[in-house]
Amino acid sequence: MSIITTLTRTWLTRTLRPFTFKNEYDQVLPFAECENLGLYVHIPFCKSVCNFCPYCKTLYSKELCDKYIDALIREIRLVGSRQSGKKEATSLYFGGGTPALAADRIGEIIDALSEHFVITEGVGLELHPDNVTPDVLQTLKDAGVTKISVGVQSFRSKFQEILGRKKVDASAMASALAAVPFETVSMDFIFALPGQTYDDLKSDIDAAFSAGANHVAIYPFIEFTFTDSPVPTMPKKEKRALLDAITKYCASKGYARASIWTFTSAPDANYSSMTRDNFLGFGCSATSLFKKQFKINTFDVGSYCERIDSGQLATSLTIRFTKRQRMIYWLFWTAYSTKVKASDFERFFGVPLKKAYGFEFWLAKRLGFFTEEDGVYQMTLKGAFYYHYYENFYTLAYIDKMWGIMRNEAFPKRIEL
């Protein structure tokens, strides 16, 4: 698998040089100069750990969670105080883990961020289905949360059993969501599970919109090497047929495709922490992306707290981009939205897209991955599937390797990808 990503990286960056992450960082982060800046906060605590989940998480205890959030607020102030005035940020997302386990302290975190940032497009937060109760939802809404994402994974019992999840009470969820409305209610599902059919996935999507969602995400199951999941992957042909069929179904229902994996029933409903030119992350495992660098915090909660308590950032690794590397990163995650605008690329890099990657986009059009109109490249069904297919290679060749190392080493010296 790594051969595919290595060849692609070599061709698109025009060099044999790998992506090199080093154990170094800047104490003053260059976010003040960034436009279209998003904010992300990671809360790693869960009541139980799902065996298929690759994200940075640890078992919840109130004492440890409070200690962590105290450090998190110190990190926010440590980073934010290095700039004068307040920086505009498009959005703020809380991920995890299960951030709603700290519902009573989310307001404190938002207040700390508001000392240094003006958030213009709302605040999103992830929830486990167990958290979708009127009391928790009201606490979050009073704290300033405007968007929520519920990790349902599946309403169907056969897949809940496969994933080690318990039954979701859709009617109780619908009642709670009706009692405490939010601007965006997203529900996450996993597709490409063994034996999953079009009817299975269609049933989940219908149930989500009936329960009060105005946005759904169907993420592909990816078999990370460091998880304990026994779930086998779905063959390529079946996966493509399923993704194409459910995309066409959503289109027939009038749901707009907001990204590769997401569909919305309302024009203003959106939930994505990834499609930003730049973003600033807080908490263990949180990443930050700037014009010339990308950094990732340590995955270890104890090491994170110790670093922050000492007045230093908890950065574990940093890559300082070449211009071509940054272009590829920008294109990869911009394409996640299914659309690439040549004018946005030129604005960000000062170079016309056709000058930098004219041949590649010409070839992508010839292969049927994109259509083009007035400098806007729109991904086709075929293109969306192959984006997913390549992302699977990318995830296993790069993210799987990096996260696997960082789960065992708080501050590795160097990683080459």
Image (cartoon, rainbow, N blue to C red):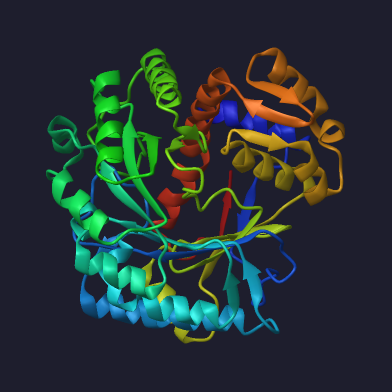
Q: Is residue 25 visible?
A: no
Q: Is residue 140 above or below residue 326?
A: below
Q: Percent x, y for residue 104?
A: 28, 77
**On the rendered image, what quadrant is the C terminus found in?**
top right
Quarter of the rendering containing residue 34 = bottom right
Left or right of residue 77, residue 57 in this image? left
Q: Nearer the viewer, residue 315 or 208?
A: 208
The structure residue drawn at horizontal position 33% and vertical position 30%, both measured from the top left corner, is 191
Q: Percent x, y for residue 209?
A: 31, 39
The structure residue drawn at horizontal position 35% and vertical position 33%, both measured from the top left corner, is 221
Q: Is residue 285 visible?
A: yes
Quarter of the rendering containing residue 69 = bottom left
Q: Is residue 337 above or below residue 123?
A: above
Q: Percent x, y for residue 198?
A: 30, 19
Q: Percent x, y for residue 248?
A: 44, 20
Quarter of the rendering containing residue 109 = bottom left
Left or right of residue 357, residue 213 in this image? left
Q: Nearer the viewer, residue 383 or 88?
A: 88
The structure residue drawn at horizontal position 30% and vertical position 44%, both measured from the top left corner, is 227
The structure residue drawn at horizontal position 46% and vertical position 48%, both measured from the top left corner, is 269
